[in-house]
Image (cartoon, rainbow, N blue to C red):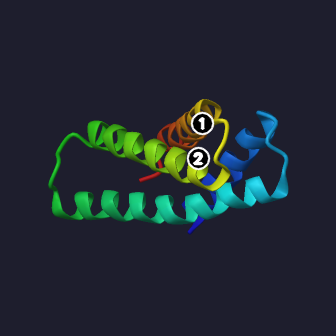
Amino acid sequence: MLILFATLGLEILVAVALGYKNKLFLLSVVLVNLMTNPLLNYVLWVNTAGHFLKIKIINLFLLEILVVLAEWFLLAFIWQKKIKKLLFLSLLMNLISAGTGIIFGVK
């Protein structure tokens, strides 16, 4: 649960820093993350428990790509505008949250 709250906090900060201050937009960032973050962490946990893929950083990288694309698609679907800007936002939010997790050794 701590990972989810940390991710939400970081990704909201990134969105605000990039100028997304509309409360409904920030709520959509939270809702999108409530769909993608638990799923990502569950898949990572299952992989770790089952030892399916041995190279964890490659696994994380591939899953993060899927998360970036899913969040971008969902935000673009919700807001129907600024498609390229939303891809950049999704990429940056996830780079920072995943990078922070890697730096602090969150598993």
Q: On residue 43, which mark appears?
A: none
Q: Indicate the amino acid at tag 1.
A: Ile
Residue 47, x across and y down, in percent: 24, 58
Q: Are marks 1 and 2 in contact (CB under 8 Å)?
A: yes
Residue 70, x across and y down, in percent: 45, 50
Examine the image and state in which quarter residue 3 appears.
Answer: bottom right
Q: Is residue 101 above or below residue 38?
A: above
Q: Earlier in the sequence, mark 1 or mark 2?
A: 2
Disc 1: CA contacts within 10 A as few (<14), some (14-19) or many (>=20): some
Q: Is residue 97 above or below residue 45?
A: above
Q: Is residue 77 left or right of residue 107?
A: right
Q: Which residue is mark 2?
A: 76
Examine the image and state in which quarter residue 34 appears.
Answer: bottom right
Residue 28, x across and y down, in percent: 68, 59
Q: Which residue is mark 1?
A: 83
Q: Quadrant of the N terminus?
A: bottom right
Which residue is found at the position 59% from the left and 30% from the top?
84
Which residue is found at the position 57% from the left and 52% from the top?
77
Residue 5, x across and y down, in percent: 64, 62
Q: CA distance from mark 1 to mark 2?
A: 6 Å
